[in-house]
């Protein structure tokens, strides 16, 4: 089971995270409520995750791992639980020495193609529950078969589970810097980390080393082996390369510090010259050059502190499978780098980009440079510049190596497939064959109209490319077979030449326009289907009256619109994921698939088929997230083994948002119903409870008085039986009286009518009175230890005596006779503490959180208690501003600690007391 720790583990601490306590400025400062809300959200998100510290450097060998281990040892010396998840020493003796004394989590062996790879074991780390874990080489790619494809994804899971992480990273492994580093060094970087990981780190420490010193370390063999060092100096580790990488790393960290300063100015409402509002709009397409454009846009947005939108304009021309896959990769890269994705439809790409830019309040538009061989496409750039108005246009150059490897020269609508071109050629040939016998009775001019009529119908089934081919073939066929002189391409009359040109123009324009209309109609129909699906989902969910109805509706509509098998696993009452899929689902779930769903549930991230996390699963699993806790998981397996398109994924996410809202609505309805029932039951219970308690008190008092009278009159008699019976009556009546008093005390606590009378009370008198009452009832000896200087405290004498007596009585009842019970009273800073310890069996670990609940009794304990004593003690202590907690002693037995606010009495009160 993969479970997220909703709160940090015991003893957890926050690494390198400052206490950004929110200081509200005066009302006159007109604090932006949106900025305030964002600040609160950031604080809440930060409190639920582990902190991330990155040791950042320009390249290998500057000492990142060494600094990380040194910092970890310093933290461990303060008593923090530190574990080594993965550290690569590269055989450096001084680095290996720093590992001595640190707890190392064994690595997991992963087999791939007959080879064994050792990777970090996330499950073993989570099972150990360290406060801090060390993870070297953040950009490392895991061996195939691992849970995640990248190590940074392992780190994200650890952070989500409340574990703090120290890690190392080089500047060349940042996604947005990979192209620049490749240009500087000539080495292509294969392993990269999204810039969002670096930006979200709680702390970044730059580990810097001048290039000369690094080259000296390299020559001494402190970085690589001598053979590898010589090769590195000749290629990557050249002084010029190192200087450029050093500047890049220092500049990146400086930009981060500048961002932190701006955040501080915003959170503290410090006036300054900084202004927000920059927003970049990036046009992306199914082109390899879009990768460089996206990375460049991310760097620009980060430098300008601007948000950015990646927009794709869908035209009437359909995309081939390869183009769709490339577009999906480009969109995924933009999402990983923090872009907001917008998809729109338009015949004119420039107009679509400009429309989105204005809708999104963009200030700059970034587009890629048209490829050199396709200068006809530069018209789009010209139109973009002409119509941009106040918008700034940035044109980013493409990669020449990518251009040389690009697809062959553009053939219109080659994506239509060879079948459509063959159909177009066949139709023209068949029409020519049918019309050839009619050439003389009808005339070749009329034949052209019949051929044109056939061309008008072709775009209803074919795309623009095949229609253009049909227009060209029909014009050639008309010329060759029908225009005199026949069976030649020569045209004798001028009017026939003009008619031939007009025929070809009308055929081409009519066919292309009709195909374009069909393409636009296809886009509109697709979007209408998506809108209809969303409407059906909303309408059906609105009529659902239970969680079962909600799930059934979701499964039916997803299966209908996406032709997929669906499984739904909901959260249970204890907030854990259900142990079986909902019966309405159609996707079979085995143990492996359930493990993937459980991971998605606790991490609230997509995983499974066609993802980088657990991709060997049969289905793709999506989380249903609620505002407070996960609501469930949806698993989907398509009938075709292909990833979702961007539009399909967008519609699915809309489905899941609606489903989450409906599930939360039904859960709130159930909670409301239960709350009404509980409130009414509680009201009736309190009424009967109070009446019964008062009615019992009178006969109990009469029984006690009668028993006391009989004991005083016959106490000196010789009848042993009578004395025994009177003692039993008196003891039973006393227990019943305490029970009635306890019931009345609980009524007072729950009614809110309890008003403590806080005054100066002598600690010795309080403890002596409580010990006297309990000792007389139980006959147990109780040891008392009161620290010197403890005399007066501010408390309600009666409530404190009763609370202490209830705790002592509980200890006497549930510990063996003759075992010691001790009280220790002392001042603890600004609190006064009373500790009650016994040497009994202690509390079961599962019972500790419930000790103070009303009517709670530990299973298997002997009868004799009501389960109200500790509840009353807690209520009385908290009414006086104090607290009480229960715990087990390491050496055996239980411990109760009562803490009350303490302030020393002044001299006049001390004199009066003495």
Image (spheres, rainbow, N blue to C red):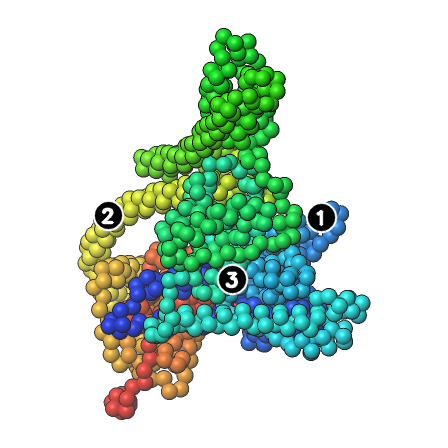
Pick the residue in front: 295 or 817. 295
Direction right: furthest residue: 227
Q: Residue at x 23, y 53 (%)?
A: 686
Question: Which label sits in the foreground, 1 or 3?
Answer: 3
Q: Residue at x 49, y 69 (%)?
A: 256
User: Where residue 409 sits: x, y (%)?
Assistant: 61, 41
Question: Which label sits in the foreground, 3 or 2?
Answer: 3
Q: Look at the image and tell me whether residue 777 can be seen.
A: no
**Mark 2 — residue?**
680
Give yes or no for contact between labels 2 and 1 (Cβ–Cβ under 8 Å): no
Pick the residue in front: 356 or 862. 356
Work out whether 817 lies above or below 381: below
Q: CA distance from mark 1 to mark 3?
A: 36 Å
Give yes or no for contact between labels 1 and 3 (Cβ–Cβ under 8 Å): no
Work out whether 875 lies above or below 25: above
**Mark 3 — residue?**
299
Q: Which mark is residue 112?
A: 1
Q: CA distance from mark 3 to mark 2?
A: 60 Å
Local SS, label 3:
helix
Local SS, label 1:
strand
Q: Look at the image and tell me whether residue 621 can be seen.
A: yes
Q: Quadrant of residue 136?
A: bottom right
């Amino acid at each position: 089971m993969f479970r997220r720790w909703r709160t940090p583990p015991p003893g957890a601490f926050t690494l390198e995270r400052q206490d950004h306590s929110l200081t509200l400025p005066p009302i006159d400062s007109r604090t932006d409520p949106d900025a305030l809300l964002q600040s609160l959200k950031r604080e809440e998100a930060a409190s639920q995750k582990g902190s991330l510290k990155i040791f950042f450097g320009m390249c290998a060998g500057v000492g990142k791992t060494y600094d990380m281990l040194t910092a970890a040892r310093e933290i461990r010396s303060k008593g923090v639980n530190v574990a080594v998840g993965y550290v690569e020493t590269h055989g450096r003796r001084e680095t290996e020495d720093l590992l001595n004394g640190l707890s190392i989590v064994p690595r997991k062996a992963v087999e791939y193609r007959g080879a064994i790879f050792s990777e970090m074991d996330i499950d073993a780390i989570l099972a150990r529950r360290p406060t801090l874990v060390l993870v070297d080489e953040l950009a490392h790619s895991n061996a195939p078969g691992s849970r995640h494809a990248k190590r940074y994804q392992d780190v994200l899971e650890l952070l989500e589970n409340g574990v703090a992480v120290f890690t190392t990273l080089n500047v060349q492994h940042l996604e947005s810097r990979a192209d620049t580093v490749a240009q500087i060094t000539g080495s292509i970087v294969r392993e990269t980390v999204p810039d969002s990981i670096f930006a979200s780190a709680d702390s970044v420490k730059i580990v810097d080393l001048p290039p000369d010193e690094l080259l000296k370390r390299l020559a001494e063999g402190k970085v690589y082996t001598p053979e590898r060092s010589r090769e590195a100096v000749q290629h990557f580790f050249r002084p010029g390369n190192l200087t450029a990488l050093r500047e890049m790393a220092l500049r990146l960290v400086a930009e981060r510090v500048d961002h932190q300063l701006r955040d501080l100015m915003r959170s503290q409402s410090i006036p300054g010259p900084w202004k927000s509002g920059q927003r970049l709009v990036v046009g992306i397409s199914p082109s390899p050059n879009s990768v460089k454009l996206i990375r460049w846009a991310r760097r620009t947005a980060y430098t300008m502190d601007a948000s950015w939108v990646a927009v794709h304009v869908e035209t009437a021309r359909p995309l081939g499978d390869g183009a769709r896959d490339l577009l999906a990769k480009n969109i995924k890269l933009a999402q990983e780098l923090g872009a907001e994705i917008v998809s729109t439809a338009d015949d004119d790409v420039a107009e679509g980009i400009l429309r989105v830019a204005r809708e999104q309040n963009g200030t700059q538009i970034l587009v890629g440079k048209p490829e050199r061989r396709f200068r006809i496409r530069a018209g789009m750039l010209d139109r973009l510049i002409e119509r941009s108005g106040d918008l700034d246009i940035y044109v980013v150059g493409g990669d020449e190596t990518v251009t040389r490897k690009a697809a062959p020269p553009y053939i219109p609508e080659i994506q239509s497939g060879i079948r459509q071109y063959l159909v177009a050629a066949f139709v023209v040939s068949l029409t020519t064959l049918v019309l050839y016998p009619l050439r003389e009775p009808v005339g070749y001019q009329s034949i052209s109209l019949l051929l044109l009529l056939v061309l008008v119908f072709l775009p209803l089934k074919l795309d623009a490319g095949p229609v253009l081919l049909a227009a060209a073939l029909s014009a050639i066929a008309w010329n060759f077979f029908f225009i005199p002189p026949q069976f030649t391409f020569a045209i004798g009359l001028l009017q026939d030449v003009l008619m031939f040109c007009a025929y070809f123009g009308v055929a081409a324009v009519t066919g292309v326009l009709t195909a374009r209309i069909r393409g636009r109609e296809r886009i509109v129909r697709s979007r209408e289907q998506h809108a209809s699906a969303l409407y059906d989902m909303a309408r059906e969910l609105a009529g659902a009256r239970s969680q079962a109805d909600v799930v059934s509706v979701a499964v039916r509509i997803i299966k209908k619109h996406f032709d997929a098998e669906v499984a739904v696993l909901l959260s249970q009452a204890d907030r854990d994921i259900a142990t079986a899929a909902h019966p309405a689902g159609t996707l079979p779930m085995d143990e492996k698939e359930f493990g993937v769903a459980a991971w998605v549930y606790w991490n609230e991230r997509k995983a499974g088929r066609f993802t980088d996390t657990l991709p060997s699963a049969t289905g793709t699993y999506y989380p249903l997230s609620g505002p407070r806790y996960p609501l469930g998981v949806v698993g989907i397996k398509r009938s075709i083994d292909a990833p979702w398109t961007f539009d399909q994924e967008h519609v699915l996410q809309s489905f899941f948002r609606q489903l989450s809202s409906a599930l939360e609505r039904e859960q709130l309805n159930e909670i409301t119903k239960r709350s009404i029932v509980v409130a009414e039951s509680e009201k009736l219970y309190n009424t009967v409870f109070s009446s019964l308690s008062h009615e019992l008190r009178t006969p109990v008092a009469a029984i006690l008085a009668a028993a006391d009278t009989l004991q005083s009159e016959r106490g000196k008699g010789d009848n042993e039986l009578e004395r025994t019976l009177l003692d039993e009556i008196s003891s039973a009546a006393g227990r019943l009286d305490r029970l009635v008093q306890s019931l009345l005390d609980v009524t007072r606590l729950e009614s809110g009518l309890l008003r403590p009378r806080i005054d100066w009370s002598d600690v010795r008198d309080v403890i002596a009175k409580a010990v006297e009452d309990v000792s007389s009832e139980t006959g147990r000896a109780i040891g008392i230890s009161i620290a010197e200087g403890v005399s007066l405290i501010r408390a309600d004498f009666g409530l404190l005596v009763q609370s202490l007596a209830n705790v002592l009585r509980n200890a006497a009842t549930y510990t063996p006779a003759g075992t010691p019970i001790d009280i220790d009273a002392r001042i603890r800073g600004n609190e006064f503490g009373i500790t009650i310890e016994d040497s009994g069996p202690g509390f079961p670990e599962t019972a500790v959180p419930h000790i103070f609940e009303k009517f709670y009794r530990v299973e298997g304990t002997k009868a004799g208690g009501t389960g109200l004593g500790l509840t009353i003690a807690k209520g009385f202590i908290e009414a006086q501003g104090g607290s009480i907690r229960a715990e087990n002693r390491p050496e055996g037995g239980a411990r109760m600690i009562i803490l009350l606010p303490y302030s020393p009495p002044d001299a006049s009160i001390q004199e009066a007391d003495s």
